[in-house]
Amino acid sequence: MNLDDHLYMSLSAAGVADLVNRGEATAVEVVDTALAVCAERDGALRAFTALWAESARARAVEVDAAVARGVLLPLAGVPVAVKASEGAQSVQNRRLVAAGCVPIGATSVPRAGTGWQTYGSTDRGPTLNPLNPAWSPGGSSAGAAAAVAAGLVPLATGSDGAGSVRIPAAWCGIIGFKPTNGLLPARDRAGLNSPGVLTRTPADAATYLRAVAPAGVPAPVAGTPRVAWTPTLGYAATDPDVAGTARHALHRIADAGLCRLVERPVELRDPAPAWTALRAGTPDRNTEALIAANAEVLHGAFEEVDVIATPTTPHPPHGHDGPGARMSVALTWSFNLSGHPALTLPAGRTPNGEPVGLQLVARHHADTTLLTAAESWYRTAAP
């Protein structure tokens, strides 16, 4: 078939794999198209710091040979962008390659030593947000989010130590998924930094999980999910327009009969001192007490509900001059400390046109329940 740029950029990861497995396109054709799209469009976007054309084409040839032998690969020929700070040899990237993915390049991250890393840096300038070049794409998986949102790739790997997958996904209007901590090896000694994925559909995030997770991830729980809403988690200074946009998305989902809202407050302690101490390797009794107190609140909440919903960030995307004193991670990093699986769905826009994410959090190891809910809710969440 003629895999032109427009068709390629519209395909999900599952759509690419289906074409390749059915012989309607080859992995080489897909990868050549992906590289051409990146060459044409990434000059202005600056999502990639490097493209790996030679190794990508070699891997695509291997995928086509496997398909010709009758091997059915769940992600056959899918171009994947790799977070630069992670590298192609991480556990999740090796497992994605085994599932048929083809790494095509490294995506931007912030410069080392910068605070609250909600932007991306390249030698050509900062990474731009495909929704509006005046906005940061978020971070630290900045280039990954921009590449997926702009259609350069259908899937990108990231890592999430305080919200670094969920924040850029929310600000670029796509899906960002952090699995239960420990499901994949943490990328830091503190165990806060979990591998994760950025996609345009929850179904692709589910395919990612099946490819990278060890056997035995529990099946989704049947029934209509019960959901508790909190705009602040008890401590965050969330903008009213952001909270209102996320809340309206959740009410659209409930009004469609896809979930049941439960009046159940979720009031945590601000995780900042505990997260900072763990990251620095200096935890003390106060750290342990804060973590234990929040764990008790979350355990109690998940006795009554299946999902906790919040805005993904307390404020909309900032400009390229940085977040200032605002804490973009305020609503995400509690779940790096607690280890719960968390995902962001596009929830619409504020009255000023700024993108908002709806963060969904589930019980430990209920990753498939979370992804199943996200698949069901996805098209209803954003108007």
Image: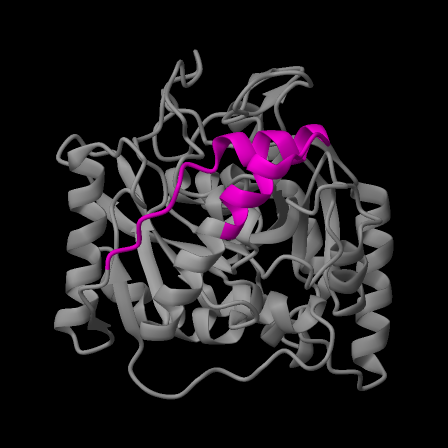
Residue 199 on the magenta segment: no
The percent coordinates of residue 274 (x first, y second) are 55, 36
Stretch in magenta? 265-292
Q: Quadrant of the C terminus?
A: bottom left
Residue shown at 48% from the left, 82% from the top: 220
Residue 271 on the magenta segment: yes
Residue shown at 36% from the left, 38% from the top: 313
* Overall secondary structure of the magenta section: helix
Front residue of 352/14: it is 352
Residue shown at 59% from the left, 44% from the top: 288
The percent coordinates of residue 221 (x first, y second) are 44, 84
Q: Quadrant of the N terminus?
A: bottom right
Q: Is residue 201 above or below residue 221?
A: above
26 vs 325, left or right, is right
The percent coordinates of residue 95 (x first, y second) are 78, 64
Residue 262 visible (yes or no): yes
Q: Is residue 89 above or below residue 253?
A: above
The percent coordinates of residue 136 (x first, y second) are 43, 25
